Image: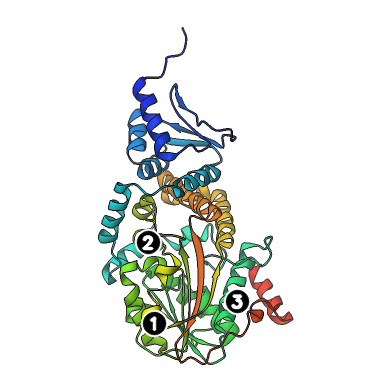
């Protein structure tokens, strides 16, 4: 007896998925029903769907349908997950987000609003998953932002140190100056600034686990006299500083709060200080993937460069330098994904299979997004209107480290 023919319902639903996803080189299979793209490109992956209910959810809402079904094992991807997501993102970039996605983005903006209370809930969801989890796949210093690879073959450890050095050079930090850092992660940058540039840093963060880790590391490194880690919202920064720094925090502020952040920065550095923003952004306004906002990164919004200037322009800050490190973030994420895969079984034991698969999808999707340009990584250097801070050339950014510094950085990275 021959194989059973695919049902009309299954074929119809697979065709609906194809219309929603686009003619990307990815095949979709449910039982005997198969949807193959009309393309001369090599098929990079086959998406195997377990049952009709899963297929229906995928046809109705590709973002949530795929994300949740992949996480709980109702969808398997045979082939290159990252490459398949690259093709999907490229196809999506060519069309306007459908109405339901735009309406859902507005609802998420409301329900995940980054008020002082909302921010604590959003940050807790992502960053307070346990330091042991992040330690499995981040570098030794626990830096969870884009690294900088002067040489593509550099290790992740060296690249993260290079990033911190580059930030200090862009700000032209001087011994004895004061710096406020908003959203300090596990504290690596604040400690680096104090150790290598002799500045005094007050670092604000509302992730309890990160703050505890940062304080312990500052004590271990002997810099508690120069670095203070404060478990508080950036909105409560009240003192005066020479410089403001934010790395990977603007994505969590929310566009509706940019003017508020700008006023905080103005109070902190006035008309004479300088500042630095490092953040994930976009080329044009689009909502962040809804599944990522619900399951991984609540409250997150990557702004366009124009949108981000709503922080600075109302306060009359001068933009001194803008750089895009998109491909550096793609490479950073490649390192993270590789380390995550190497520790996948440990993540399963720690957090469960569904969690591990969700984070695999999140990291793989992030690699794809930065590779194809769906996401960007902007660094913006700015200063107050009366600041004496002048960047005459960019030469100082690329001068080699002196021998002592270079040796110390390399030793610490091993």
Relative to 219, is 112 above or below?
A: above
Residue at 52%, 75% in the rendered image: 189
Quadrant that contains the C terminus: bottom right
Nearest the eye: 150 or 203: 150
Q: Secondary structure at mark 3?
A: helix
Q: Earlier in the sequence, mark 2 or mark 1?
A: 1
Residue 371 sits in quarter: bottom right
- Count neighbours of disc 1 (C-alpha within 10 A) and say few if under 14, some if 14 to 19, many if 20 or more: many
Q: CA distance from mark 3 to mark 1?
A: 22 Å
- Count neighbours of disc 2 (C-alpha within 10 A) and say few if under 14, some if 14 to 19, many if 20 or more: many
**Nearer the camera: disc 3 or disc 2:** 2
**Colour style of the rendered protein structure:** rainbow
Which residue is labeled 1 in the image? Answer: 265
Relative to 42, is 64 above or below?
A: below
Position of 239 with respect to 142 (left or right) is: left
Would you say residue 273 is visible in this rendering?
yes
Which residue is labeled 2 in the image? Answer: 300
Which residue is labeled 3 in the image? Answer: 165
Q: Residue 405, how many percent across, how many down?
A: 68, 80
Q: CA distance from mark 3 to mark 2?
A: 27 Å
- Count neighbours of disc 3 (C-alpha within 10 A) and say few if under 14, some if 14 to 19, many if 20 or more: many
Nearest the eye: 244 or 384: 384
Q: Earlier in the sequence, mark 3 or mark 1?
A: 3
Q: CA distance from mark 2 to mark 1?
A: 20 Å
Would you say residue 250 is visible in this rendering?
no
Q: Earlier in the sequence, mark 3 or mark 2?
A: 3
Q: Secondary structure at mark 2?
A: loop
Relative to 159, is 295 above or below?
A: above
Residue 352 bears which disc, if any? none
Relative to 299, is 172 above or below?
A: below
**Nearer the camera: disc 3 or disc 1:** 1
Residue at 51%, 30% in the rendered image: 38
């Amino acid at each position: 007896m021959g194989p059973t023919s695919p049902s009309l319902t299954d074929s119809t639903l697979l065709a609906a998925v194809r219309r929603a996803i686009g003619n990307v080189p990815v095949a979709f299979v449910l039982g005997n029903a198969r949807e193959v793209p009309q393309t001369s490109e090599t098929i990079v992956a086959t998406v195997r769907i377990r049952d009709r209910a899963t297929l229906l959810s995928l046809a109705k809402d590709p973002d949530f349908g795929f994300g949740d079904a992949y996480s709980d094992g109702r969808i398997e991807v045979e082939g290159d997950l990252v490459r398949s997501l690259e093709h999907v993102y490229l196809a999506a970039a060519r069309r306007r987000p459908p109405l339901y996605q735009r309406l859902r983005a507005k609802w998420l903006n409301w329900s995940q609003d980054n008020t002082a209370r909302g921010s604590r809930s959003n940050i807790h969801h992502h960053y307070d998953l346990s330091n042991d989890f992040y330690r499995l796949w981040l570098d030794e210093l626990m830096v969870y932002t884009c690294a900088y690879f002067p040489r593509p073959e550099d290790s992740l450890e060296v690249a993260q140190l290079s990033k911190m050095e580059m930030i200090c050079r862009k700000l032209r930090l001087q011994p004895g100056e004061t710096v406020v850092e908003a959203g300090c992660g596990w504290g690596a940058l604040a400690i680096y600034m104090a150790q290598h540039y002799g500045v005094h840093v007050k670092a604000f963060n509302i992730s309890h686990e990160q703050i505890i880790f940062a304080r312990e590391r500052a004590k271990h490194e002997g810099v508690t006299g120069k670095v203070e880690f404060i478990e508080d919202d950036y909105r409560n920064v009240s003192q005066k500083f020479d410089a403001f720094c934010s790395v990977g925090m603007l994505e969590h502020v929310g566009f509706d709060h940019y003017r508020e952040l700008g006023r905080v920065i103005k109070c902190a550095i006035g008309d004479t200080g300088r500042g630095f923003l490092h953040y994930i952004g976009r080329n044009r306004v689009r909502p962040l993937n809804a599944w990522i906002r619900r399951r991984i990164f609540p409250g997150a919004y990557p702004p366009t460069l124009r949108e981000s200037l709503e922080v600075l322009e109302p306060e009359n800050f001068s933009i001194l330098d803008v750089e895009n490190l998109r491909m550096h973030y793609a490479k950073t994420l490649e390192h993270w994904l590789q380390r995550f895969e190497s520790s996948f079984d440990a993540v399963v034991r720690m957090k469960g299979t569904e969690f591990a698969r969700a984070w695999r999808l999140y990291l793989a999707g992030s690699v794809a997004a930065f590779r194809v340009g769906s996401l960007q990584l902007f660094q913006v250097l700015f200063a107050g209107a009366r600041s004496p801070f002048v960047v005459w050339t960019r030469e100082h950014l690329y001068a080699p480290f002196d021998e002592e510094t270079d040796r110390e950085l390399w030793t610490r990275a091993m």
